Amino acid sequence: MYNKNLYNKMINCECSFDELVKFSVNMSVKKDFDFNDSFNKYYNLDKILMAIEKYLNKTINAEYLTYWANVYNWILMASYFFNDNYSNSFKQLLRNSISWELDALSFFDSENIKQDTINLNKFIVEFKVLDYLYNRINNFMIYYAFCKDEFGENQIKALFIDEKNKIFHVVETDNFIPEKNVGTKIEIDELKEKVLNLSKQKFKKMKLFFKKKS
């Protein structure tokens, strides 16, 4: 049975560093996790932004932030990592993308506060974009295409378009095949052409949209 009190302390960056490390070392132990729809139960953009802000305000250090990102990622994805509670919906693709960003944050390497602020602001924008897509996915038309990445591995590019707000975003990932009748499959050249046309039509890339508002 998972420790609800410890969960809350970890999610809110209220636990000690030693508690984070101890939990992290034992994360392969299933009993430590809540598997009941873990992502929807525990995902909250504000928690991620709070942890980053605590580092920038020097409330926590870089090592605490990296351990926190790793632990929070496992808390969110417990239903998927352990129980294979997985779908091939585009909402799942976005869950995966949020998880991968947290994984990247868990390798954050502090340089100096000026460079750290620049690097972490990039994370903030990316998390905001993915959160917007995740919570408003029904507002988007989705086109996707299969292609090869720079290493020759199979990859999917998904283009999300919000006609009303004139914004768009491309999510790239591998090892993902969407469910039937979800999104519109097109060729990669057609997807690239759509992106060019959107820019010509004054649609904004979501990263720029959120960077301006941050």
Image: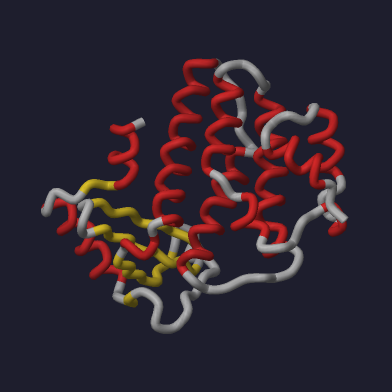
Q: Nearer the viewer, residue 186 or 136?
A: 136
Q: Residue 52: where, in percent of width, then height?
A: 56, 29
Q: Residue furthest left?
A: 201
Instruction: Give the side of residue 59 with respect to residue 209, left or right.
Output: right
Q: Quadrant of residue 61?
A: top right
- Residue shown at the point (20%, 52%) measured from the top left: 166
Q: For the N terminus, give its image quadrant.
A: bottom right
Q: Position of residue 53 (x, y in %)?
A: 55, 25
Residue 174: percent from left, percent from top: 51, 64
- How many marks on residues? 0
Q: Is residue 145 left or right of residue 38?
A: left
Q: Is residue 186 above or below residue 75?
A: below
Q: Residue at x 67, y 58 (%)?
A: 38
The reply, left or right, for residue 168 in relation to residue 52 is: left
Across and down, in percent, residue 142 comes to 33, 67
Position of the C terminus by quadrant: top left
Depth check: 52 or 149 in front?
52
Q: Nearer the viewer, residue 125 or 156?
A: 125
Residue at 28%, 54% in the rendered image: 168
Colour setup of the view: secondary structure
| Residue at 48% from the left image edge and 69% from the top image edge | 154
Q: Residue furthest front?
A: 5
Residue 22 sits above or below residue 161 on the image: above
Q: Quadrant of residue 198?
A: bottom left
Q: Is residue 58 left or right of residue 90?
A: right
